[in-house]
Amino acid sequence: MATHVDIIGFHKDEFVEIQFFGKDRKGEVLPSAEGQTVTLVLSRTAGGNAVDGLKWSTGTGHITLTDEPNSEWKLAFSPDDFAEVSEGRYYFYNIWTQLNPGAPILQACGRFVLRPSISAT
């Protein structure tokens, strides 16, 4: 079962870092974490298609396996990665894992919003 968490504490011009522990469908640590593909999708509607440029997967440099035995990943983004995200507008996110071949597992979902920039203009 996916964890529902709203990501609402970051500002438009900040670096965003998210960590999560992958679980299988029984709620246990994912086997073969090294071989999993992790994908983060931002959409305008719950369960909707990714907004252009707002989908990242393992191999893009944004998603790193930090602890294989515990199936822990870190997702890290610079302000440039979210240039297309409007500040103060709610998006929806999904984080998926998938061991190929295999059905994807929804790990986390919720609302995503960047608060207004706090940098000097």
Image (cartoon, grey):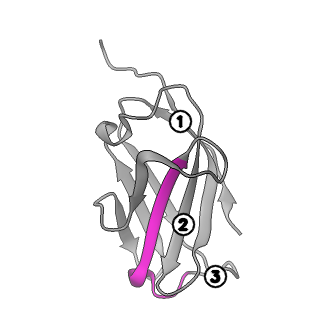
Lower sequence index among marks 1 and 2: 1
Residue at the (40%, 74%) spot, across then down: 67
In the rendering, at what x and y percent does residue 14 appear? 36, 34
Q: Is residue 60 left or right of residue 98?
A: left
Q: Alpha-carbon distance for marks 1 and 2?
A: 22 Å
* Residue 39 belongs to magenta span: yes
Q: Secondary structure at mark 2?
A: strand
Q: Is residue 4 above or below residue 66?
A: above
**Residue drawn at 49 percent across, 87 percent down:** 101
- What residue is rendered at 59% in x and 34% in y? 90
* Mark 1 surroundings within 10 Å by alpha-carbon count, few (fewer than 14), some (14 through 19), many (20 or more): few
| Number of residues whose C-alpha sits closer than 10 Å to that of mark 2, classed few (under 14), some (14–19) or many (20 or more) | many
Front one among 43 and 68: 43
Front residue of 33 and 36: 36
For label 1, the SS is strand
The residue where tag 2 is placed is: 96
Q: Is residue 36 magenta?
A: yes
First in residue order: circle 1 vs circle 3: 1
Q: Which mark is residue 9?
A: 1
Residue at point 62% right, 67% down? 106
Quarter of the figure with the C terminus: top left
The stretch of residues the image draws in magenta is 30-42
